[in-house]
Image (spheres, helix red, strand yellow):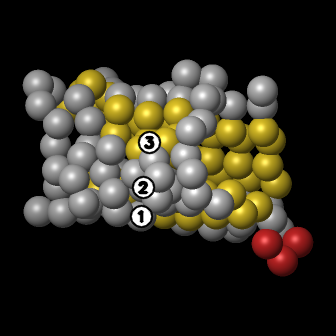
Amino acid sequence: MPVVFDDNGSATPAITITPNDVAPFHVTVSNLLNQYTLGGAAIVGTCGLTKSGTAGLTLNGTNTYSGMTSVNAGTLTVNGVLSNTSIFLANGATFIENETGMLSGSEMRFTSYGTATLAGSNTYDGATTVGINGTGAASFCT
């Protein structure tokens, strides 16, 4: 079953996944107003995550799902772990990985047409593609 977060629900308090990990068919966050934070246990399995709408989404926890993470608009902030997913960042979208974040996995790829900040301890093996066709910006922190 897909899980959808939009402006019809409440984003306060932060959403805590508990007590066990969840493995939905797909996670869609389409938010223009509500800022969502997902934490606690993790999103796992073969699902993917799609973020659209101008408001933000923050992921905490150790998320190990293997489907695509697509950020079509707004900001996706990672304070936890994203492992095994590939990330696509559209033009105009923002991806922020804080120092507490980590991207990992042997099949992970990161493609950014938007604005990306990678400040965590990253151990993924795939390609990082930034600023294709003259668009996008990136910050790599050490």
Name the foreground residue: 31 vs 119: 119
Assess disc 3: are there few (<14), some (14-19) or many (≥20) residues with their C-alpha within 10 Å of its C-alpha: many
- Residue 45 picture location, percent across and down: 22, 53
Whole-Å distance between the Cαs marked 1 and 2? 6 Å
Q: Residue at x 23, y 29 (%)?
A: 41
Is 99 placed above or below 97 here? above
Identify which residue, 52 or 87, lies in the foreground. Answer: 87
**Which amino acid type corresponds to the residue marked 3 in the rendered image?**
Leu
The answer to whether residue 27 of the structure is visible from this angle is yes
Tell me if I can see residue 35 in this picture: no
Residue name at image x 71 percent, y 41 percent: 117
Q: Are marks 1 and 2 in contact (CB under 8 Å)?
A: yes
The residue beneath circle 3 is 82
In this rendering, position of residue 75 left or right of residue 80: right
Residue type (three-letter) at the residue carrying disc 1: Met
* Residue 118, percent from left and from top: 68, 39
Local crowd size for mark 1, using a 10 Å CA cut-off: few (<14), some (14–19), many (≥20): some
- List the residue tagged with mark 2: 85
Task: Give the residue at mark 1.
Answer: 68
Is the N terminus in the top left, top right, bottom left or bottom right quadrant? bottom left
Figure check: 14 above or below 114:
above
